[in-house]
Amino acid sequence: MTITVKDWQGKEHPFVVGPRNPHWTPYGALPAALKKAVVASEDANFYTHDGVDYEAIREAIKADLRKGEFVRGGSTIPQQVAKNLFLTREKTLIRKVKELVLARRMDDALSKSRILELYLNVVEFGPMVYGIGHAARYYFGKPTSALTVRECAFLASMLPGPKVYNPYRKMDRVMRRSDRILRRMVAARLISREEYDAAMAEIPNLEGIARKVEKALETPPPEEAPGGIPVIEPSPPAVSPEPGSEEPPAPVIPDTE
């Protein structure tokens, strides 16, 4: 399967979904800490809902009503995969209903591990950096399987949108969010206290970061907006605000991988 993704200048590029992609990382090669960090960050009830988290949707509606604008989507990982692989990004009720139906069907047809594998292999982590395999090499110069707990939380913190959580320009923002993810993980006993302490003491060593910063500054990205998963049918991306300091519910993750 080949879809279309965009670079930060809006130019479209083909993107192969599946093992033919040289950066594709199968579920078994994904570090346990990465799976836990992503679920803790993006979809706390991933392993218990049926593709749609109705409580998260209710909370998102409340937040939108308080702000008087769209600030939270309440989308689960299956919803994001369904939306971005099969739908447009237009904000209509019909599109949202289709997304919910597809997410339910996806959750029925695929295992949680397969859905998470798809998500992590197509999500955007930077300028034309799609998928965790490419991201691990791009930022840390190593295979995905070698990522540390801190590095897993660091990459998970970028998932709301690498243009908003851009380590080149806003490293402090990325680090603060990765710290929050680590706190959620230890609070939910997804990692041990020793792993947490070691991760908090670690400063991510971004491979060639100085060179990439210089290059990025030469060609600044367009107005910040969430990167999300590559879309098939292009449409203007929605702006995603920085999450608040409130901690979400502790994620429910099975003991077995």
Image: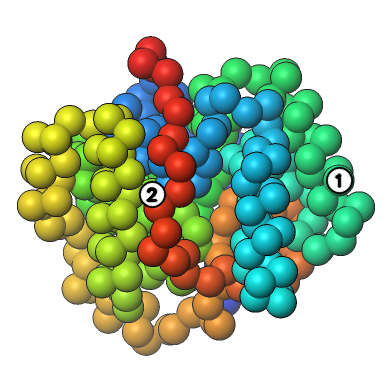
The spot of residue 112 in percent (x, y) is 56, 23
Give the side of residue 207 with respect to residue 135, left or right.
left
Residue placed furthest toward the right: 94
Q: Which mark is residue 160?
A: none
**Whether residue 44 can be seen here:** yes
Q: Which mark is residue 97?
A: 1
Which quarter of the picture shows residue 145?
top left
Mark closer to the observer (1, 2): 1
Is label 1 in contact with label 2 (beta carbons under 8 Å)?
no
* Labels in figure, total: 2
Colour scheme in use: rainbow
Residue at 38 percent of width and 49 percent of height: 156
Quarter of the image where the N terminus is located: top right
Residue placed furthest toward the top: 256
Residue at 27 percent of width and 30 percent of height: 189
**From mark 1 to mark 2, how far is it between C-alphas?**
27 Å
Mark 2, residue position: 156
Q: Amino acid at mark 1?
A: Val
The spot of residue 101 in percent (x, y) is 83, 35
The spot of residue 242 in percent (x, y) is 47, 69
Pick the front one: 137 or 162: 162
Q: Amino acid at mark 2?
A: Ala
Quarter of the image where the C terminus is located: top left
Pick the front one: 110 or 26: 110
- Where is 254 relative to 43, above or below? above
Pick the front one: 170 or 129: 170
**Whether residue 237 can be seen here:** no
- Where is 228 relative to 9, above or below? above
Which quarter of the picture shows residue 198?
top left
Give the side of residue 167 with respect to residue 219, left or right.
left
